[in-house]
């Protein structure tokens, strides 16, 4: 099948969160399954520089009149075929340093509606034959950045003889791409695309609704989140629309990219390890304690956090529970960046107890790997979590996840209850109520288990053995593509 995947990020070229990991891994899993996949990305500097041998394949005129070029090149893949990648050459929109969405003051760029409308527009044009050399059968758009693609396809006057299916994946319903209503005029869509059944959301312009309203099939990144977003509590005001489209909505759990996240082969770890052979993991822990200036205590349970520091991630619970964590003899190592108040609060805690709390602010891919490699417990107490990848990396690297039982966290972590331990299913620690007490009790359970090494080893073995590769997820996406085509 010929598939065009459309996203704003793609690991390893450009990443601000889990979207990039998925956008990088899924096409490669589809290639490995014998599919003809290409990707489309905005021409951000990191994309432009990371796509090799790019040649112009077409010109296109944005709905508001500016002329851009479509280029096609390839992204090399270790141990696999190259991935063919289109990018939109429009430097006045994309050639800006740093974060792809925000300026240096962390404010969204004023012209984001145009920057990402062009992504959806170009995608729809490719779907309808813009590149004379290749036309997809299915277009797969990710998140609000690409969400106008299905709307442009639905309203396109330039549709060819071949019907092209569209699939839209929600990675996070909380980020909707909302803009002032007058920007609708820029999009070049007919008046029928406005209104409650179109892109209007309480008087504003919603890119997300382009995907939710017009794609043939909608997916999200875990079965539990697929149910949650149909409720008023978690629907972000779109639950009604999602309930109406429930027949074409499904949840497909993300996988873990084995090429990037595998403790047996991970070149970013100082010592490799694998299930049943954990001497390397202990050495990773010792090395990390030294690197971060933590006390070199092999038996102090090491809790790690690798996260965006935003309200979604529930990290105020970690701050609130930190005294109890330290009192029970634990250490905390955090890597993250985001909201200023959280950065400041964690920085202060590290300054007050540098031998047991380490805080690294910023984005650091190698350190992320080392944290999972060294950790005993990975903390992911998110308020909501569409899928969550860090708990899966924690599982695979034997750093048992401690999670709030929501979304993808509920679908990937089995609490260490006596019965699930007896059945060999337990893989971590879950709490139900999103408050200090819920978190504190899960923390207690983690410490209690840690003091029982044989049980700890058994749970860790289950965690590390949990199957999580992308092959299964890719097969499910292929089913969805077939449905979108039908
Ligand atoms: P989200 O996409 O909501 O941020 P996920 O758990 O799905 O959450 O994915 C987060 C991804 O970003 C993971 O690959 C994680 O390792 C990575 N990550 C988050 N913060 C950092 C950071 N400060 N440095 C390096 N990697 C990070
Ligand atoms: C989003 C979600 C996260 C998910 C990721 C990849 O960023 O917040 O839960 O794992 O997308 O699908």
Image: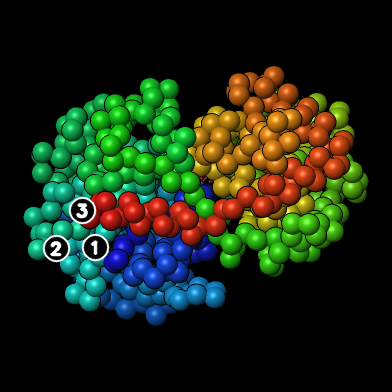
Q: Are marks 2 and 1 in contact (CB under 8 Å)?
A: yes
The image's mark for residue 162 is 2
> Of marks 2 and 1, which one's residue comes earlier in the chain?
1
Q: How many marks?
A: 3
Q: Residues within 10 Å of mark 3 (few under 14, many from 20)?
A: few
Please name whichever residue, 363 or 127, is drawn nearer the observer in this view of the structure. Answer: 127
Which residue corresponds to mark 3?
486
Asked which secondary structure carries label 1, the reply is loop
Q: Position of residue 284 (x, y in %)?
A: 80, 57
Q: Is residue 467 left or right of residue 320?
A: left
Question: Image quarter for residue 342?
Answer: top right
Residue 373 seen anywhere in this rendered image of the structure: yes
3D distance between C-alphas at marks 2 and 1: 8 Å
Q: In the rendered structure, which disc, 3 or 1, sits on the residue that comes first in sequence?
A: 1
386 and 482: which one is in front? Answer: 482
Eye-nearest disc, 3 or 1: 3
Tell me if residue 370 comes above or below residue 192 in the rendering.
Answer: below
Q: Are marks 3 and 2 in contact (CB under 8 Å)?
A: no
Binning the other alpha carbons within 10 Å of mark 1 as few (below 14), some (14 to 19) or many (20 upward) gives many
The residue at 69%/38% (across/down) is 423
**Going by the image, does 439 lie left or right of 223?**
right
Give the image location of residue 190, x and y in percent: 10, 44
Q: Which residue is mark 1?
A: 137
Gap between marks 3 and 1, in whole Å?
11 Å
Q: Residue at x 70, y 31 (%)?
A: 419
Q: Residue furthest front?
A: 423
Query: How far from the left and from the top, in percent, is residue 278?
Result: 81, 57
Q: Position of residue 288 (x, y in %)?
A: 80, 54
Residue at 33 percent of width and 28 percent of height: 239
SS state under label 2: loop
């Amino acid at each position: 099948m010929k598939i065009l995947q459309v996203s704003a990020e793609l690991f390893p070229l450009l990443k601000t969160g889990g979207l990039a990991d998925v956008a990088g891994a899924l096409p490669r899993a589809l290639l490995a399954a014998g599919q003809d996949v290409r990707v489309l990305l905005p021409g951000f500097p990191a994309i432009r520089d990371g796509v090799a041998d790019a040649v112009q394949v077409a010109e296109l005129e944005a709905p508001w009149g500016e002329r851009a070029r479509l280029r096609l090149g390839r992204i090399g893949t270790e141990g696999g075929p190259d991935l063919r990648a289109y990018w939109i050459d429009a430097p006045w929109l994309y050639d800006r340093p740093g974060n792809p969405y925000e300026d240096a003051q962390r404010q969204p760029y004023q012209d984001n509606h145009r920057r990402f409308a062009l992504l959806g527009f170009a995608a729809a044009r490719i779907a309808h034959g813009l590149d004379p050399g290749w036309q997809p059968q299915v277009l797969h758009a990710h998140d609000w950045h690409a969400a106008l693609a299905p709307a442009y396809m639905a309203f396109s006057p330039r549709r060819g003889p071949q019907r092209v299916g569209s699939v839209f994946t929600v990675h996070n319903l909380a980020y909707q791409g909302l803009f002032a209503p007058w920007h609708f005029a820029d999009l070049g869509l007919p008046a029928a695309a406005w209104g409650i059944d179109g892109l209007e959301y309480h008087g504003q312009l919603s890119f997300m609704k382009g995907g939710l309203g017009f794609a043939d099939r909608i997916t999200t990144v875990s079965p539990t989140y697929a149910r949650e977003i149909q409720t008023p509590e978690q629907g972000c005001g779109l639950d009604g629309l999602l309930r109406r489209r429930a027949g074409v909505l499904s949840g497909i759990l993300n996988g873990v990219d084995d090429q990037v996240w595998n403790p047996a082969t991970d070149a970013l770890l100082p010592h490799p390890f694998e299930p049943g052979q954990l001497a390397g993991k202990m050495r990773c822990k010792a090395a990390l304690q030294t690197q971060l200036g933590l006390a070199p205590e092999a038996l102090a349970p090491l809790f790690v956090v690798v996260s965006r520091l935003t309200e979604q991630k529930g990290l105020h619970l970690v701050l609130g529970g930190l005294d109890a964590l330290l009192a029970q003899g634990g250490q905390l190592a955090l890597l993250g960046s985001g909201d200023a108040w959280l950065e400041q609060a964690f920085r202060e805690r590290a300054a007050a107890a540098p031998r047991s709390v380490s805080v690294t602010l910023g984005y650091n891919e190698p350190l992320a790997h080392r944290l999972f490699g060294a950790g005993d417990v990975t903390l992911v107490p998110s308020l909501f979590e569409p899928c969550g990848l860090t708990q899966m990396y924690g599982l695979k690297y034997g750093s048992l996840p401690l999670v709030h039982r929501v979304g993808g966290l509920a679908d990937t972590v089995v609490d260490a209850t006596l019965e699930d331990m007896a059945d060999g299913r337990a893989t971590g620690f879950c709490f139900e109520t999103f408050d200090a007490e819920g978190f504190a009790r899960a923390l207690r359970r983690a410490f209690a288990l840690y003091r029982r090494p044989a049980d700890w080893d058994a749970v860790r073995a289950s965690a590390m053995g949990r199957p999580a590769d992308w092959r299964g997820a890719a097969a499910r996406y292929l089913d969805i593509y077939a449905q979108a085509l039908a």
